[in-house]
């Protein structure tokens, strides 16, 4: 298995594992930078991605249900249609991230930086946004609960 760079066809990491999720876990253990990684269409549910650099990565249609993304660097990351149901994104850096159509139902975005993030059509019901920075975020057609 290999994890490829989104900007060229070079691979970031390869290994003798059965799933991309296992390879991501190896990368985290070995402190390998996952910036620009193509992890689209991957199931990373219940994965501990705390403080991981995923800046400018492609996580389109990725399953991140109940994952721990506390303090993760997701600036400029493509999270279109990603499933982040119940994910913990406390303090995550999501500046200019594309979350168009993403499902963030019940996610914790406490203290997250969402400046300039595109949340068009995103599912935001039950999301915790305490101290989150939503300046310049696009929320057109987003579904959310009003307090």
Image (cartoon, rainbow, N blue to C red):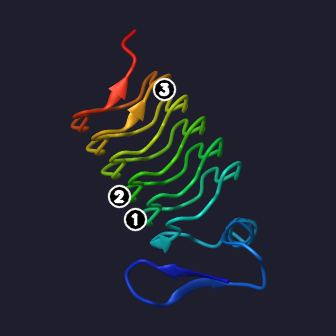
Which residue is under mark 3? 127
Label 2 Cα neighbours within 10 Å, binned few <14 / some 14-19 / many ≥20: many
Can you identify the residue that label 1 sits on?
56
Q: Is the residue under label 3 in contact with that under label 2 (CB below 8 Å)? A: no
The x and y percentages for residue 127 are 48, 26
Vertical order, 75 against 119 (above or below): below
* Residue 43 to residue 36: above or below: above
Label pair 1/2, CB-CB below 8 angstroms: yes
Residue 147 x, y percent position in the rendering: 40, 9
Q: Residues within 10 Å of mark 1 (few under 14, many from 20)?
A: many
Q: Comparing marks 2 and 3, which lies closer to the viewer?
A: 3
Q: Residues within 10 Å of mark 3 (few under 14, many from 20)?
A: some
Q: Which residue is mark 2?
A: 76
Q: CA distance from mark 1 to mark 3?
A: 23 Å
Residue 116's x, y, as percent?
A: 26, 44
Residue 85 in the figure: left or right of residue 123: right
């Amino acid at each position: 298995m290999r994890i490829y760079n989104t900007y060229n066809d070079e691979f970031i990491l390869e290994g003798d594992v059965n799933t991309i999720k296992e390879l991501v876990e190896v990368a985290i253990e070995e402190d390998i930078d996952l910036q620009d990684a193509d992890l689209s269409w991957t199931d990373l549910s219940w994965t501990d991605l705390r403080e991981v650099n995923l800046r400018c990565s492609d996580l389109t249609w990725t399953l991140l249900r109940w994952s721990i993304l506390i303090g993760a660097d997701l600036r400029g990351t493509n999270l279109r249609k990603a499933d982040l149901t119940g994910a913990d994104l406390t303090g995550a850096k999501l500046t200019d991230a594309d979350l168009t159509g993403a499902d963030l139902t019940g996610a914790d975005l406490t203290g997250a930086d969402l400046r300039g993030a595109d949340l068009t059509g995103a599912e935001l019901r039950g999301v915790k946004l305490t101290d989150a920075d939503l300046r310049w975020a696009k929320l057109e057609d987003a579904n959310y609960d009003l307090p």
